[in-house]
Amino acid sequence: MNWELYEVWGISEDNTEELIETTKSLKEAKAIAKVNIEDETSNIVECTIYYEDEDGELIEVESISAG
């Protein structure tokens, strides 16, 4: 069985990186990143979406920045 997994990582103003969420949908990953960047109560200034390949390696798909 072949399945895809995307991880959304948030980068805060102090350059700390943390996992926000995982999903099976790239479209959903992009929506999650956008919501977290636009959240005024959050200090996340950038989100990076990674794809997990068959070997468990993370490959950067897209980086989304505030502004």
Image (cartoon, grey):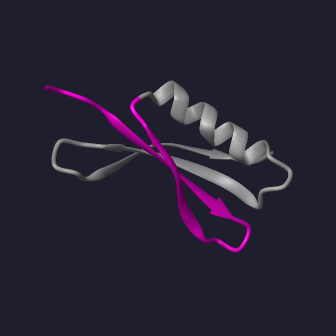
Quarter of the C terminus within the rendering: top right
Residue 38 sits inside the magenta stretch: no
Q: Main secondary structure of the magenta part?
A: strand
**Figure check: 14 above or below 2:** below
Q: Choose between 67 and 53: the one closer to the eye.
A: 53
19 on left or right of 6? right
Residue 23 lies in the magenta-colored region: yes
Q: Is residue 64 left or right of residue 27?
A: right
Magenta segment: 1-24
Q: Which residue is located at x 25 percent, y 29 percent? A: 3
**Whole-percent x and y of residue 21?**
51, 47
Query: Based on the displayed image, in which of its 4 quarters is residue 13 positioned?
Result: bottom right
- Residue 48 position, x and y percent, is 53, 49
Residue 29: x, y in percent? Answer: 52, 35
| Residue at the image point whose x is 34% and y is 38% from the top | 5
Above/below status of 60 relative to 15:
above
Of all residues, the one furthest to the right in this rendering is 40
Q: Does residue 18 appear left or right of residue 58 in this picture?
A: right
* Image x and y of residue 54, in percent: 17, 42
| Residue depicted at 70% across the width and 74% down the height | 14
Q: Between 28 and 58, which is closer to the camera in this rendering?
A: 28
Tally of numbered discs: 0
Indicate the quadrant containing the N terminus: top left, top right, bottom left or bottom right.
top left
